[in-house]
Image (cartoon, coloured by chain):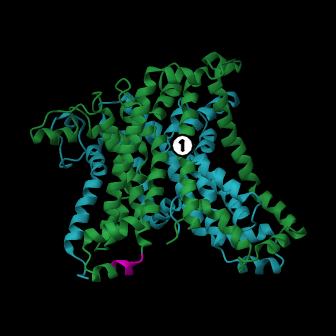
Chain colours: A cyan, B green
Amino acid sequence: MTGRPLWKTALGVALTALMLFPVYWMVNVSLTDAGDLRRSDPNWFPSDPTFDGYEAALSQQLPSLGTSLVIGFGSIALTVAIAAPAGYALAVLHLRGGRTLNFLLLVAQMIPAVVMAMGFYAIYVRLDLLNTVWGLIVADSTIAVPFGVLLYATFMAGIPRELVHAARIDGAGSWRIFTKIVMPVSRNSTLTVALFAFLWAWSDFIFASTLNRAGEYIPITLGIYQYIGNNTTQWNAIMATAAIASLPAAILLVVAQRYVAAGVTAGAVKD
Amino acid sequence: MTTTSVGATGRASDSGAAGHRPAAPPPDRHRRRGVPGSARQWTALGFAAPLLAYLLLFYAYPLWRNLDLSLHDYTVRAFVQGDPDFAGFANYAEVFASDSFGTALLNTALFTIVSILFQYAIGLALAVFFHSNFRLSGVLRALFLVPWLLPLIVSASTWSWMLNSEHGIINSVIQAFGGDQINWLTSPGTALVAVIIANIWLGIPFNLVILYAGLQQIPGELYEAAAIDGAGARARFWRITFPLLRPVSAITLLLGFIYTLKVVDVVWIMTTGGPGDASLTLAVWSYREAFGTGQPDFSPAAAIGNLLIVIALVFGFIHLRMQRSWEKS
């Protein structure tokens, strides 16, 4: 072993910079003066930064940021409320037909969102649920629920049986075991599920653009999209909105990185 | 090395229930299905009930509505009033006969296959690189996740602006090196290339994370032994890393395929499938028919959607079949 060669770090930094260039460019454009955007040789650095873009973004897009927050937290609540007990039923209570259910959940994850969007649209038209925040919370949660159940079930299957047995001998019922033992032990799984339920709802474009096209409260993804349509000259404001919309992802990556990595791998690899 | 997916959960918990003596599971099972067992089954059903109701209401019902859409002739009026004419497979026939079908099918194949091959190759190279654990490798690897976490509208609109013909940074660089301006998003020859480039960028983090996790499962002694035997870095990669990573690679590629097949947002935001049909994939076509124009045409859109489900399921079953055979071995 030759220790830790410095050239690898240098190469790693260069590769990361290359990979993150679009993100840098978004920030750079968001700080550029609208007049300079139309130059054929763009400024590589925000040498004369202006916050006009952010002012425009915040004055126009604040309500949609709030809507997206509400939808994100609604999706977390719905997803955890459905997925956690189901994971418990599968992994701890050994629900009969569990294998079939697992299989259905895997298949559910393969269904294209555009198909679900059409189905939901057809249903919501009749129920008058188009352009409502509730409708969007339900639709967005469908991305996270199958993932959540599988993640909970995998984790809960690994909870030592003695723990559950001992509680049962002490006279605890299934509900008590679920709330007092299984859920606290599964705290990390809950964080991972919540994180992804939020991110997917926050980032969703397909459901937003189909089920909430004319709503009074539109989420931020649709806000950006309509911005691009109406406002093709003000790319600094569009990129400023995009940068603001990226904040949750950035924050979560910093504070919850290991849950992110856990979630990505849970879908494919488990050791 | 064990490589299973969360789909193996059912099986794992079954064997757990059979206790520590896998040689004699049947009697144990019988006891579990006795009187207290069946009471527990009702409890289990109670805990699973919200999920079952959810799946029926918010998965089965929309899918059934979608099937219904594809088998009827839904005009906008019929859509609201709910009295469409039954059309049988006419919508499917119309889709297959459409001029856009061949283009969309070819574009879908190109978009998915080229995307996942590049995502995989780059992801694997990066995973091997980061696996050598140099200073800062953990932080840099985390930063590589950023593209995957950003909302797609953010990435797609940033790429649109970078690829803009007159004011985009990419053309500016090309012209600085004496090249000609390329109309990335607006010329039929390059629109598909442009969305593939953006999509490769989006998929690298997923491939990197999964392949990196796979690499960590390969015992380090293998490399040490190979190094003692005088194997170079190249030989170690092709003789150890690549063959041992095969199961993880197959899963990554198949999941990548299924995910890429569904992609709508990136393409729609960057090119709306155009110009003409130049970057139209099946998923984008379905979206365009249903929601993309002023005249929604749900029936053919639903037919295309169902076609996509069939393709996704075929590859999904291959995925599950492969996993099962590895678990046995």
| Residue A76 position (above or below residue B269) | below
Q: Residue at x 67, y 42 (%)?
A: B58
Give percent across and percent down for residue B309. Answer: 57, 39
Give the number of callouts: 1
Residue drawn at (25%, 57%), measured in percent from left and top? Answer: A17
Q: Is residue A218 visible?
A: no
- Is residue B26 visible in the rendered image? The answer is yes
Q: Nearer the viewer, residue B319 or A174?
A: B319
Q: Residue at x 57, y 24 (%)?
A: B92
Image-based side of B167 in relation to B57, left or right: left
- Of all residues, the one furthest to the left in this rendering is B178
Which portion, as a residue range, is magenta? B219-223
- Give SS at disc 1: helix
Res B224 quadrant in image? bottom left
Residue B66's spot in the image, x, y percent? 63, 32
| Residue that mark 1 sits on | B312
- Split into 4 quadrants, where in the image is the C terminus of chain B? bottom right
Q: Main secondary structure of the magenta part?
A: helix
Residue at (55, 59) in percent of width and height: B323
Height in image: A73 above or below B96? below
Q: On the rendered structure, is B232 left or right of A120?
A: left
Which amino acid type corresponds to the residue marked 1 in the rendered image?
Ala
Pointer 1 chain: B
The quadrant holding residue B107 is top left
Label 1 crowding class (10 Å Cα cut-off): few <14, some 14-19, many 20+? many
Q: Please, which residue is most extreme toward the right here? A: B35
Task: Give residue B231's position: percent from left, percent from top.
Answer: 26, 76
Q: Is residue B138 magenta?
A: no
Q: Is residue A196 left or right of residue B144?
A: right
B166 horizontally vs A87: left or right? left
